[in-house]
Amino acid sequence: MGMTTQNRAAATARISNESMTQPSTSIHATAIVDPRAKVAASCKIGPYCVIGPEVELGEGCQLISHVSIEGPSKIGSDNVFFPFCAIGMAPQDVTYKGEQTRLEIGDHNEIRESVTINRGTIKGSGLTRIGSHVLIMAYAHIGHDSAIGDHSMLINGATIAGHVTVEEWAVVGALCAVHQFTRIGAHSYIGGGTVITQDVLPFSMTSAVRDVHAYGLNKVGLERRGFSKERIRKIHQAYKILLASKMNTSQALAKLKAQESRGEDVDTLIRFIESAERGVIK
């Protein structure tokens, strides 16, 4: 059923703090928008969408059809939500008792069909956060209290458990399962079907063939993002020490720290390994 005349009028009043010269929000007759939601005037709400209370949609967002969003959820500008995605739903945690937790989504994200994103939990950070310019492909799941960095990609069916951090520009392959409390390092690439139970090194290519290994540098990805040959050379040299030498991790880190001209990227790699709580995939 569509909105009642009274509810539609209340929703329209809620979203019209803009100048009268601005275009009015396009809300399909079959969509249901709670009068307590805040929807920017330039949004397009397609057929059979449901927007609950305490949802804030920024400028230029588009809900194509059959999208459900619950709150508290704060969503930035120019995000596109494809059919049947469920955004800001309660966390899938048996200890959750309806506490006030949140979801925040940045700008210019594409969230494809049947994606599910849960709010945080009190025992976690209380917040699930998606950055900006993120592509989340069909059937992916992002669990409670997780953080997804800018420009990252989750390929079809990727499953991110609770309390996971995916850093900027990382790619999580199709049908990957990422264990809770793990980190996916910046600029890394995870091959399809890989089960991740430890932290994935920044700049790495990690995949499951017989078992899970870091296979070296994500060179193609770094080149596409404008890394200079010298930056790539320094990271590659660090990976030779970490992965191809007979040193253990502590010995490899000591050797890397002894290099005076190692560069900021190698420093990032060192800090990542030293802060790992679940260990890293080598």
Image (cartoon, rainbow, N blue to C red):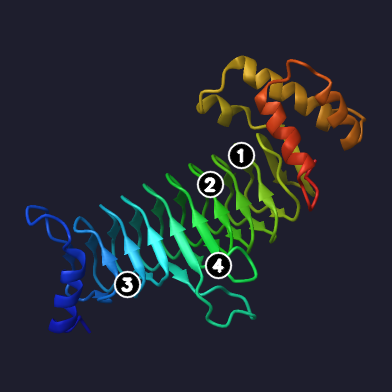
Residue shown at the point (72%, 34%) measured from the top left: 269
Q: Which residue matches tag 4?
A: 120
| In front of the other: 7 or 243 | 7
Task: Point out the tag, 2 or 3, that comes first from the N-terminus.
Answer: 3
Q: Which of marks 4 and 1 is in front?
A: 4
- Badge 3 or badge 1: first in the primary sequence: 3
Q: What element carries label 3?
A: strand
**What type is the residue that disc 2 sits on?**
Gly
Q: Is residue 263 above or below residue 131?
A: above
- Tell me the residue at 26%/63% (across/down): 39
In three-dimensional space, the C-alpha distance between marks 2 and 4, rounded to whole angstroms, equals 16 Å
Q: Count neighbours of disc 4 (C-alpha within 10 A) and say few if under 14, some if 14 to 19, many if 20 or more.
A: many
Q: Residue 3 occupies which quadrant of the picture?
A: bottom left
Question: Image quadrant for the N terminus?
Answer: bottom left
Q: Please report whichever mark, 2 or 1, sits nearer to the chain's N-terminal start.
A: 2
Rendered location of residue 22, percent (x, y):
11, 53
Identify the mark at residue 186; answer none if there is no mark: 1
Q: Mark 2 or mark 4: which comes first in sequence?
A: 4
Can you say whether 193 is above or below 238 in the image? below
10 Å neighbourhood of mark 2: few (<14), some, or many (≥20)?
A: many
Q: Return the mark for residue 6.
A: none
Q: What residue type is labelled 1?
A: Ala
Image x and y of residue 197, in percent: 75, 55
Q: Which residue is disc 2 drawn over?
A: 149
Question: Could you tell me how far apart the alpha carbons at marks 2 and 3 are, in whole angstroms?
Answer: 25 Å
Whole-angstrom CA distance, mark 2 to mark 1, is 8 Å
Q: Are marks 4 and 1 in contact (CB under 8 Å)?
A: no
